[in-house]
Every structure is written in C-alpha cells, then in structure tokens.
Image: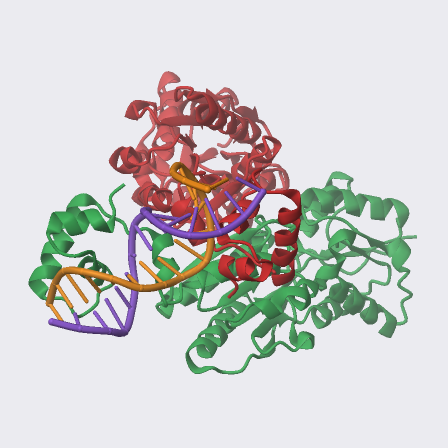
Chain colours: A green, B red, C purple, D orange
DNA sequence: CTGAAAGCGCTTACAG
DNA sequence: CTGAAAGCGCTTACAG
C-alpha cells in the first residue's frame, strides 16, 4: 500500500508538503503542486481516511441514518434528501440500520469518530431519542416522527400529521356511506414507534365523531409491514367481521397485499370492499384499481429537513418542529357500500 | 470526548492494559478486567474506530457494495446475503453506490482503508471490474454479472443465465401462438452492464429459431428501469407496432408499468396483449393479473455467494463462476393471441 | 499479567 | 513556500 511517505520520497518533497497539496492548501508553489500531483496520479495514491479523520478538524459530511433497509417510503425520502443536499453542494453519508437496532445509540457511536457536521434520521423511535440523543452534539433532524415533546435543543423534526391524515381518510370513508370499517397493520412489537398509534387514534376519532362504535379488539387486525402481512391480515379481519365494507390499511404496502387477498377471495374492490392505504408510494398508482391513499409529501419533507439542517449548521438557527401537509388521494379503490340484504 | 487515556487514568492502569481488555485479550487478570470494564461502562467509552483500524491487523467485516439505491431486486439479494452471513456468524458492512459511480473504483478506495476480509458486489459493470479490480487484494464475489471472462484469481461470480432465461420466456410466448412480439426496457446508456444485452439476445434467438423476423429497430423500445419508464415505453411501442400481441419486458418493474399503461389504454391483459417480465420481485405476485416472469433464485444466489466467499477467506479456495437456475413463472398475464381480423 | 514505547498514516502549528 | 516535529487514539511486540 502506498502512503504519503512514498509520495514524499518519490517526489522529493516532505510529507508535510504532500499533505498540503492533498488538502488544497494555498501555501504551495504551483510548480511543486504540479510535480506532487503528478506523482500522486502516477502512483494512484489515495490518502488513508482513517488517519485523516484522526487528525482533521474539518467535519465530515452530513450523515443520514435510515432505520430499516427495505422501507420503500423511507427510501423515497432518502433519495429526495440526497438530491436536495446535492443542490446545496453538500455531500452525504448514508448508514442503513437494522430494524431492531437503536438508531440513536448507533448514531452516537458513529458520530463520535466520524464527526459529521450534522445528522438526519429517517425513522426511529422517539423513545430511543429520549434515551440517547443527548450524547449527539451536532445539529440533527428527525424525519417521520415528532420530537417536539422531547425538548432537545439540537433536534428538529418534520413529519406528516398522522393523526389528522388518518382522521381524514376514515372520515372520507364515512362520508361515502361506510359504517362498518376495519383497520389493518401496525406491528404490536414496534408499537413504540408512534406513527401507528397516531394513525389508529385518528381513525378511531373520526368514527367516534360519527357515532360509529369502533370495537378495536374486533375491528383492528395488527400485522407486519409487508405485502404478505397485509394479505393475511385482511383475511383474518374479514373472517372475523364479514360485515365490514371498508378497510383502512396503515401503509400502502399492507393495502396492496390486502387488495390482492380480497380479489383472490372473490371480493371486488371497490364494489364490495373499499380500501385505503397510507404513504403514497409509487406502486399505489400501479395497482388495479389504483389505491386510494394518504400521500405524504416526500419532496417537501426532504426539502424542509435539508434546509433546516443547513441553516442550523451554518447560522446556528434554533431547532424547529413542523408538520408537512399531506394530500388525500382518492384513487379508484373506494366506492359507496353496496346494499347488502 | 473520552479516550483510552482517560480510562487508563481513571482506572489506574496503563493504556496498554485498557486496550487489552477492549480487545478481549486473554492476558489480563479477571480482577483488572472487571475494574477497567466498570470504568468503560461508567464513562460510556467507545474506542475511536479510526485509530483502531489504523493499527489493527484484524480485517474488518465483509463489505457489500450495492450498485444503485432503489433497485428492488438487488435489495432482495442483499437481504438474503445478510441473513446468510448472520447464520455463519459474520458481520457485514453495506455501502450503497450511486448509479453513475464506478463501483469497483469506489470499492478499491474503501477497501484500502477499511481492510475488509472480503467484498461482495451486487451489480456493477464487468468493464469496471476489468479496469480496476486488480487493485483489490481480498477475496471478492460478483453477483448478477458473469466475470468468468475476466480471469481474475480473486473474483468469483454467480449469476442467472440471462440469455437462456430470456430465450425460454420468449419461446413460451411463441408456443402460445404469438408471433408479433415486442421487447421493452434496457437503458441505452447503461448498455455496458451486460445483462440487458444478454436478455435481448436470448429473446432474439428464440424468435430466429422459430423463423420470426425480429426487426429490432421497430420491435425493441429502450427505456429506463422504473415503472414510469415501462409505462411510457410500451405505449410508444404499441403506437409504432399496433400488431403486437405479446411484450417481453426486461424487468418486472418495467412490466408493471407497462401493464397499467396497457390497461389504461383499454387493452386487456392477457386477452389482448400478453406480458412477461424478468426478476420475480415480490410485487409481481400482487399485480392484477399476476405477472408472468423469470423468477431469479435470490436465496440461492445469496447462499452461493456467501459460501464461496467464506470458503475462500478461510481455506483459500479458488474463485468460481456459476450460473444459478431460474424458474419460469407463468403468472396470469399470458394467453394465446386473440384472433384479430 | 502489566507497563513503557514505537508506530499506524496523516495534519498542522512552528520555524525558517 | 517548505521542512522537521509533535500528536491524533489506538495496538502490539518487547521487557519484566
């Protein structure tokens, strides 16, 4: 492995000078710079990053922590954030964390030796932030969960108003004439993530205001976040409550699984059963029928997160907590309930 | 920031001894170990990874390089590989690379300072390997493209036989009675990736053997790899060649977009137009109708890759190149062509 | 079993 | 503008 020492030896300069050209310091004569750069190219030399960050004061790029690897919705936000960062001339460094990891604890560790300018968290439980965030000392923003209640100076948050969105979704179903409404999704294990609870609470409130008795024990069927989970969950639900005419799925993936399950069992969507999802992932537009959903504003979530973080890094702005408007997307999967005798 | 020096000072031992307990060296008395561990816990000390890997001989975990961030098929392989590695008690470190990056060049750089035991590449162009792989000196495997022609001692490859699979897919269409067959997908820009060419070549060969004249200029419509791309491409194709009765899409994502486009234009799938994709992603089972496809054996690709790499790391086995059987999945999107007058 | 010391590859005041 | 030297946080022979 060729090191800075080799470059120094070959070029005939000291390692200090070589280091200066690597770091684009202006204190090097053009002639020297050129010679050294030639040697670097010729030797195909890459400075050892470990050694560098061991000394360097410069902070490394903004780090993005994504909770879970196969979350199509977070993937979309990530992509947008990277685009936005690029527009602002900033690099990013992405770390995917397992479902079971405590994202914050991991981030603490990484930020200790990487020294990022700032952190963006996509997903993650508010409880974990409460527990470990105090050890992160760079500006950070959480996207997808509301951290305002935590009161950390260093943590902003941008999120969709899950409660209101679910309230609106279910209100719409009710306005279409549905009164027998089921809910699927929401893994009991990850209950502490918060979003699921808020969506269920919003849905329940919509029913309550319309004097529909939401018997959660019967009408709510929990399941994981994959299509298969939605497939199985809706069947369990329909078997238990065959009178149901509309289903609110806690995520689009779950809804897509449910749609296919219903169709396989001979239900027509939406003529027999209406269906609405949550998120607004690209696939929702490609199902047949197109899925009604709550479309979260991914570009806006990303834009706000990036601008917030950059302003705080550069101008020490204060952390903020904001809710980004969603859009109800009627799709083709909702109809008025058929008169059944 | 607390360092090993602080731990040494507080515990009253030397930094050498502290280092030994951190590294689980056996040459430490139980009493000392306990005292030092207590201080580490109490101070919440995390050793600086940069400093560590600067010295350490131990290689870091296997690195996995994934080409592109939103490739649902590679994501599936990645997940399987991580499961397999976990079974073997190995950790992994995943790096997602941009579409435009030269994965191998990036891997070279990273492997220089991370010193992984081995590398797994998911996707990536064979040309880039030819150019830069020689600088990687740890066992590596490429999944998704055939590297046998490159002749590197350090690079295995496991892949689906794209040519034969496409040949089989199109042969099936022909056996169903189709003779007017179109192909969509395959971005001309990423043409050097190889897979696309092989799939098209296999399809063309199937036609040739059945004395169907495949006018590639007319019957092949290139496009990107997203659903939207497939949506637009199939419409361009049908407009140009309205006589087509069957479409082979180079990937499932493209096929799903095409399916919806055809349905939106009033074509019935499969009654009017038959459709087949490639990959076997989970969504293919959730479209309506279910998508016919070439199901790549993801678990097997992952398993082989992992076992190969581990054997080579531990027992200096030689690199190998193997093709993993695929499965033709008839789905519900293929029918015999309607008699049109 | 433990400590003192050299050194990993680099950066950065400090002189000149 | 350039070099010599200290030091980043850690690991690991080498003594004892």
* Front-lying residue, B157 or C4: C4
Residue A323 picture location, percent across and down: 62, 75
Residue found at x 49% / y 59%: B5
Residue A184 located left or right of residue B341: right
Residue A309 picture location, percent across and down: 48, 73
Residue A182 located left or right of residue A313: right
For this orientation, the residue located farthest to the top is B209
Camera sees residue B272: no
Quadrant of residue B56 in the image?
Answer: top left
Residue A222 picture location, percent across and down: 79, 51
Quadrant of residue A129 in the image?
Answer: bottom right
How many numbered badges does the structure rendering display? 0
Camera sees residue A5: yes
Placement of A148 over or under B211, stated as above or below: below
Residue B258 picture location, percent across and down: 49, 44
Residue found at x 37% / y 40%: B186
Location of the N terminus of chain A by quadrant is top left
* Front-lying residue, A16 or B286: A16
* Front-lying residue, A174 or A41: A41
Residue found at x 55% / y 54%: B13
For this orientation, the residue located farthest to the left is A31
């Amino acid at each position: 492995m060729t090191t800075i020492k080799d470059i120094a030896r070959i070029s005939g300069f000291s390692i200090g000078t070589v280091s200066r050209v690597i770091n684009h310091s202006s204190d090097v004569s053009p002639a020297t710079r050129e010679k050294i750069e030639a040697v670097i190219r010729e030797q195909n030399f890459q400075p050892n990053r470990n050694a560098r960050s061991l000394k360097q004061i410069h902070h490394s790029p903004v780090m993005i922590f994504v909770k879970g690897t196969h979350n199509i919705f977070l993937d979309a936000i990530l992509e947008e954030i990277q685009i936005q960062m690029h527009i602002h001339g900033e690099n990013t460094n992405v770390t995917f964390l397992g479902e079971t990891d405590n994202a914050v604890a991991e981030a603490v560790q990484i930020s200790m030796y990487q020294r990022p300018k700032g952190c963006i968290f996509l997903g993650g439980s508010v409880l974990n932030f409460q527990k470990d965030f105090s050890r992160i000392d760079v500006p950070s923003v959480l996207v997808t969960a509301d951290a305002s209640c935590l009161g950390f100076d260093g943590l902003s948050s941008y999120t969709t108003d899950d409660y209101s969105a679910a309230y609106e979704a279910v209100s719409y179903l009710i306005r279409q004439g549905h009164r027998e409404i089921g809910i699927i999704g929401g893994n009991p294990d990850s209950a502490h993530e918060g979003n699921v609870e808020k969506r269920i609470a919003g849905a329940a409130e919509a029913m309550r205001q319309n004097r529909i008795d939401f018997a959660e024990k019967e009408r709510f069927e929990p399941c994981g976040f994959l299509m298969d989970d939605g497939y199985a969950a809706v069947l369990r639900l329909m078997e238990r409550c065959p009178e149901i005419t509309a289903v609110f799925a806690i995520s689009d993936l779950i809804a897509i699984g449910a749609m296919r399950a219903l169709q396989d069992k001979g239900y027509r969507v939406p003529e027999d059963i209406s269906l609405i999802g949550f998120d607004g992932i690209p696939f929702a537009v490609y199902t047949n029928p197109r899925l009604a959903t709550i479309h979260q504003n991914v570009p806006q979530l990303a834009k706000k997160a990036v601008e917030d973080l950059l302003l705080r890094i550069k101008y020490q702005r204060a952390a903020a907590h904001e809710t980004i408007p969603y859009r109800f997307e009627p799709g083709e999967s909702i109809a008025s309930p058929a008169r059944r005798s």
